[in-house]
Image: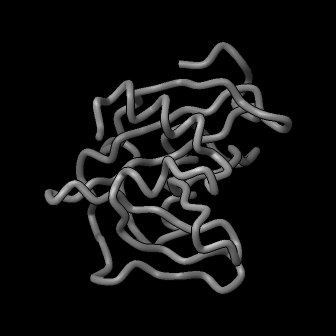
Amino acid sequence: MPRVALHECAVVSLLRRDDGKILGISRGLFVDDIGLPGGRVDPTDPSLPHAATRELYEETGVLVHPGALRPVFEGPGGSSVKAVIAFVVEEAMEIPERPESIPFEGVVGWHPPAAFLSDSCSYQGFQHQLFQHLKIR
């Protein structure tokens, strides 16, 4: 786990279907800027898994128990955080048939891994490192 304070971290969750598609969310109105659900750890989050479950639910409507998340990767942060921790969702308690899209937050959907690696993705570098680490193609 990270060697920095919780409030200096961000978290992302990777949820993958049997067909290989990954749950992602577009960044704002830029539909080609696909990222994994996640965000900064809030001061009220008691742990990184709790932060990841909160962010996943807020952004997609997918409900998971913090114990169903497995930490798999830690990458460097950017301008506002020092580390980004990636979790794989081992088991979801509830996945809406069609995950929610939040107005002005982005469009939620299932995407092939390549959609997360295009030049238009804000987090392309981190996602590339994560997918390489997990051998996702």
Query: What is the quadrant of the C terminus in the image?
Result: top left
State the residue lying farthest toward the right: 79
Quadrant assignment, res 133: top left
Q: Which residue is the extreme one toward the front?
A: 119
Q: What is the x, y in percent for residue 104? A: 71, 81
Foreground residue among 83 and 64: 83
| Residue located farthest toward the top when viewing the structure as drawn | 3
Residue 14, percent from left and from top: 39, 48
- Residue drawn at 72 percent across, 48 percent down: 42
Residue 64 drawn at (x, y percent): 36, 57
Query: In the displayed structure, would residue 91 be above or below residue 98?
Result: above
The residue closer to the viewer here, 55 or 125, is 125
Q: Residue at x 59, y 74 (%)?
A: 31
In terms of depth relative to the viewer, which is nearer, 2 or 25? 25
| Residue in the image at 35% along x and 41% along y | 88
Identify which residue is drawn at 60% across, 19% down: 2
Question: On the image, which quarter does residue 45 sit in?
Answer: top right
| Residue 102 locus on image (x, y percent) | 60, 82
Residue 58 seen from this side? no
Q: Quadrant of residue 83?
A: top right
Q: Residue furthest left?
A: 18
| 55 in relation to 106, above or below | above
Left or right placement of residue 14 versus residue 5 in this view: left
Left or right of residue 30, residue 108 in this image: left
Q: Taking the image as drawn, is residue 65 in sight?
A: yes
Looking at the image, residue 91 sits to the left or right of residue 72; the answer is: left
Colouring used for the render: one colour
